[in-house]
Image (cartoon, rainbow, N blue to C red):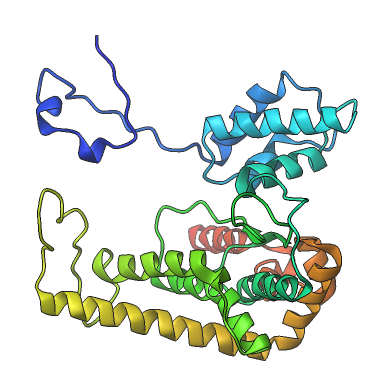
Amino acid sequence: IIMAATNRPDVLDTALLRPGRFDRQIGIDLPDLVGREAIFKVHLKAIKIDESVKPSVLAEMTPGFAGADIANICNEAALIAARREKKAVDLDDFNYALDRVIGGLEKKNKIISPEEKDIIAYHEAGHAICGWFLEHASPLVKVTIVPRGVGTLGYAQYLPKEEYITRTEQLLDRMCMTLGGRAAEKIIFDQISTGAQSDLDQVTKMAYGMISIYGMNDKVGNVSFYGLQKDQFQKPYSDETATLIDEEVRKLIDSQYVRAQELLTQYKNELVILAEALLEREVILKSDVEKLIGNRPFEIKASENGTKPEDKEAEKEEETAE
């Protein structure tokens, strides 16, 4: 029996996949919430952990992480606890390890001018405020303006839901939230900076995906050009269609940028409060945001009367069954 593994099955030569060769393919997805919890339990056996550390909580903090990533976080947390001369690894060590894995090493020697720090604080606060007041944005976990890694001057961490289908309104809210940093810079300083380069890259890819892959545009229509460019020296559509796609992408991004500006103008007071808190503390957690500007409105609706949306659906099903 001959076995092989690859992360890119889409680029394999078809001759390799003929019957009698590598004709049986088994797809292995990234672990889900239950899978990550089980993996954490395995790696935590070799570590002396504090009572505050729960595998279920760690699993919720690491969506999209592979088994190797989880092992890395456990090792990093143990090293951090050892440096701090602790008897057991606590949740704070895991939080610090997660920051290190996601954002890179903390750059304590990086000198940032007060003007740049202001821009970074409002940029990250812009992301956080947009996500806080957009229904389909991922819940906020942490905002920081501590420089990390290569070129990372700050970031906002979210906990995306583990879903297999994404609707149009969800993608639009993500785009709006991603553009919140640049929109905040424009509103507060009436200027823009290079700090939004990564955001613009993400938004551009999302917009092209919505229009040319997922068929989420009325003018371009229900077409998908995904994978059609393989082994071809030219685009699988006309120059007119290419121009139309570019125009619709630009319109889509511009509309979400305007939407982000309008949202941040409406909640400008909250934006300033959060940015000032970031300048003072450098790291703000979700609980801190709730104390500063109140609970996230959509979470209040979901937990109304102590009943979750899925519980309400279950109640309706029971009533129908009766």
For the view shown, which residue lies furthest in the top direction? 1
* Side of 106 relative to 32 (left or right): right
* Side of 56 relative to 242 (left or right): right
Residue positioned 20% across, 71% down in the render: 222
Q: The N terminus appears in which quarter of the rendering?
A: top left
Residue positioned 74% across, 69% down in the render: 305
Q: Position of residue 257 (x, y in %)?
A: 49, 82
Q: Position of residue 145 (x, y in %)?
A: 72, 62
* Side of 23 relative to 200 (left or right): left
Quarter-wise, where is residue 126 in the image? Answer: bottom right
Quarter-wise, where is residue 80 in the image? Answer: top right
Q: Position of residue 267 (x, y in %)?
A: 69, 86
Residue 190 shows up from this direction: yes
* Side of 110 relative to 317 (left or right): right
Vertical side of 127 occupied by 35: above or below? above
Between residues 76 and 52, which one lies in front from this camera angle? 76
Q: Position of residue 110 (x, y in %)?
A: 73, 55
> Number of numbered discs present?
0
Vertical side of 99 occupied by 244: above or below? below
Between residues 33 and 78, which one lies in front from this camera angle? 78
Residue positioned 23% across, 40% down in the render: 10
Vertical side of 1 occupied by 77: above or below? below
Between residues 180 and 131, which one lies in front from this camera angle? 180
Residue 298 shows up from this direction: no
